């Protein structure tokens, strides 16, 4: 078995088809098929299964995928681990960030990290918090800055702050009274994140708890797409305060606090079953320092800093 077998296999699983993987890594599709055939012959079991929508891993393939990702990540990190011995942190760190947090924190932090850790290259990935957690568990990511509602087992984390949720709408349709109940919120036209999503899970649970169905008029998978629809007057949304300002807030109404209070906690998270590399630990500390400094410099209503290490 060669490393190329593992690399090609991982790319095929992530692409969902041989043709898409071939286009991504610039290897002819017959050559990819041959590599997988060699891999399956070596292992003695099929690792991929074909279906109408493309391919997916077999049960054995799922195990292989998890282990291959770990092996390939460690090999990618190995030069930096060796170079970091006795010197500055060095290497590649895969960092994920939820789209809500990335809108405020992402770009500025990467610039700060480059200045603080010049020998570390950060591979930056934006997605929703639930997807980021899955990618940490498969070791596709070293770290992630994300929102949580309840702390799931199997992860290490440094909680940074928690923040209350607000209703935010276009000023042409939003008439804030300071607070808004879940019952009233359910009656308003809403633009919400597409499930699975941590904020969506919180809202769905609360709506179900009081026995109401929300008036969801549209969904989006990125903060930018949600806020674009809100600014067009399609409906309002629910967010932590301070993270709606990516494109300016002049056209937004006065936010309303949701009552009873709903919170999300922002944490830096990593896998609990693998020690962080020196470079990843340096990025973790830099990210925590940056977020804490940012929240002290700027007033984010409803935000409460938490102890972190």
Image (cartoon, helix red, strand yellow):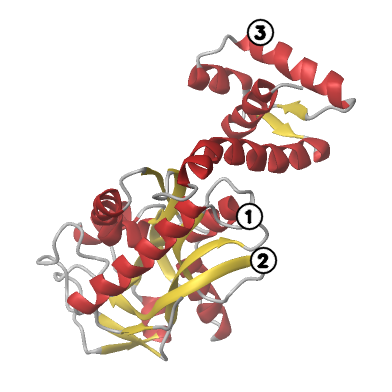
Q: Quadrant of the N terminus?
A: top right
Q: Is residue 35 left or right of residue 175?
A: right
Q: Secondary structure at mark 1?
A: helix
Q: Is residue 47 above or below residue 280?
A: above
Give me the residue at 9% from left, 67% from top: 250
Secondary element under disc 3, as helix, strand or loop, is helix
Residue sitting at 58 percent across and 40 percent down? 73
Residue 63: x %, y % from top left? 77, 42
Q: Residue furthest right?
A: 44
User: Residue furthest toward the left?
Assistant: 250
Along the horizontal axis of the image, is 35 left or right of 309?
Answer: right
Q: Is residue 296 visible?
A: yes
Mark 2–mark 1 contact, CB under 8 Å? yes
Cα separation between marks 3 and 1: 32 Å
Give the residue at mark 1.
Answer: 137
Q: Position of residue 221 (x, y in %)?
A: 41, 52
Closer to the camera in the image, 265 or 84: 84
Residue 192, quarter of picture: bottom left
Q: Which mark is residue 30?
A: 3
> Residue 245's spot in the image, x, y percent?
19, 64
Residue 168 seen anywhere in this rendered image of the structure: no
Compared across the picture, whether 42 is left or right of 290 comes to: right
Mark number, residue 154: 2
Kindly identify the residue that appears in the image at 77 percent across and 28 percent down: 49
Query: How far apart, in angstroms, are the residues tagged by discs 2 and 1?
Result: 8 Å
Q: Secondary structure at mark 2?
A: loop
Q: Earlier in the sequence, mark 3 or mark 1?
A: 3
């Amino acid at each position: 078995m060669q490393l190329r077998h593992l690399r090609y296999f991982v790319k095929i699983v992530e692409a969902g088809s041989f043709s898409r993987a071939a286009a991504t890594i610039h290897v002819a599709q017959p050559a990819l098929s041959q590599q997988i055939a060699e891999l399956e012959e070596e292992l003695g079991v099929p690792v991929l299964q074909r279906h109408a929508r493309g391919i997916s891993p077999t049960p054995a393939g799922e195990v292989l995928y998890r282990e291959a990702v770990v092996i390939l990540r460690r090999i990618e990190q190995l030069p930096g681990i060796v170079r970091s011995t006795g010197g500055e942190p060095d290497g590649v760190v895969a960092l994920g960030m939820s789209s809500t947090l990335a809108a405020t924190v992402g770009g500025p932090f990467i610039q700060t990290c480059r200045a603080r850790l010049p020998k570390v290259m950060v591979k930056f990935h934006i997605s929703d918090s639930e997807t980021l957690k899955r990618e940490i568990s498969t070791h596709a990511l070293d770290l992630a800055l994300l929102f949580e509602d309840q702390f799931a087992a199997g992860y290490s984390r440094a909680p940074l702050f928690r923040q209350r949720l607000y209703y935010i709408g276009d000023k042409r349709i939003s008439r804030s009274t300071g607070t808004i109940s879940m019952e009233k919120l359910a009656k308003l036209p809403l633009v919400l994140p597409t499930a699975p999503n941590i904020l969506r899970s919180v809202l769905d649970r609360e709506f179900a708890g009081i026995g109401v169905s929300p008036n969801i008029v549209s969904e989006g998978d990125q903060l930018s797409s949600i806020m674009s629809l809100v600014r067009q007057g399609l409906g309002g949304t629910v967010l932590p305060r301070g993270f709606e300002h990516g494109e300016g807030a002049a056209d937004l109404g006065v936010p309303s606090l949701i009552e009873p209070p709903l919170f999300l906690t922002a944490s830096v998270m990593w896998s609990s079953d693998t020690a962080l590399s020196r470079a990843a630990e340096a990025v973790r500390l830099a990210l925590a320092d940056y977020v804490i400094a940012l929240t002290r410099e700027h007033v984010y209503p409803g935000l409460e800093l938490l102890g972190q290490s």
